[in-house]
Image: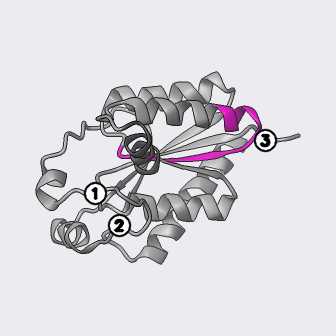
Amino acid sequence: MHEPPRLYIFSGLPGSGKSTLAQFLARELHCVYLRIDTIEQGLRDLCDFKVQGEGYRLAYRMAADNLRQGLSVVADSCNPIALTRREWEGVARGAQASYVNIEVICSNPAEHRRRVETRENSVVPGFHLPDWQAVAQRQYEPWDAERIVIDTAHPLPECQRALLAELWEMEEVGAG
């Protein structure tokens, strides 16, 4: 029997390592990859207006289209508030797909700051990465839902293994 598609909903502050892990998972599991930064910058470039929630709303539609085609999707976004988290989950339910929330954190503030201050944007042309002050002041609501938490204060290969192990364990529990 064919497994239903899954929506992997990534969340985390800029510079936490979220996109690195989301891209890894998309490659590893052969999923469609949707990055909010890319979508929002595309809207800015094409429509020349201040983007608010339009990027998320467009991403929801793109994710739903792919899930309905039987393709799993990795959604890479800050996803900082309960409202957007519930909306992503609703996208999966509406497409009769399963979902998993994945929160990426960096528990080492000095390392997180170093990443934010030294990273270069070579992936999304025209996109301006936030500075440390903007990241530190960003609204990010506490979670009230089940999720996998990956702490990227650890080396990347360890984080990748931890993410896959959590997903495999979830599959085994769900199959049991």
Which segment is the magenta one?
65-78
Query: In the picture, which quadrant includes the C terminus?
Result: top right
* Residue 50 versus residue 26 in the image, above or below: above
Q: Residue at x 35, y 73 (%)?
A: 154
Residue at point 46% right, 26% down?
A: 87
Labels 2 and 1 touching (C-beta < 8 A)? yes
7 horizontally vs 35: left or right = right
Q: Is residue 117 above or below residue 137?
A: below
Hey, what amino acid is under mark 3?
Glu
The verdict on residue 26 being magenta is no
Q: Earlier in the sequence, mark 3 or mark 2?
A: 3
Q: Nearer the viewer, residue 70 or 170?
A: 70
Q: What whole-number distance in Å separates the C-alpha atoms at marks 3 and 2?
A: 36 Å
- What separation in Å lies between label 2 and label 1 (alpha carbons)? 8 Å
Residue position for label 2:
121
Q: Is residue 83 left or right of residue 68?
A: left
Q: Disc 1 marks which residue?
A: 128
Q: Secondary structure at mark 3?
A: loop
Who's the residue at 43% across and 74% down the image?
156
Q: What SS does tag 2 mark? A: loop
The quarter of the picture where residue 24 lies is bottom right
The picture places residue 103, in percent across and down from the top left corner, at 39, 49
- Disc 1 element: loop
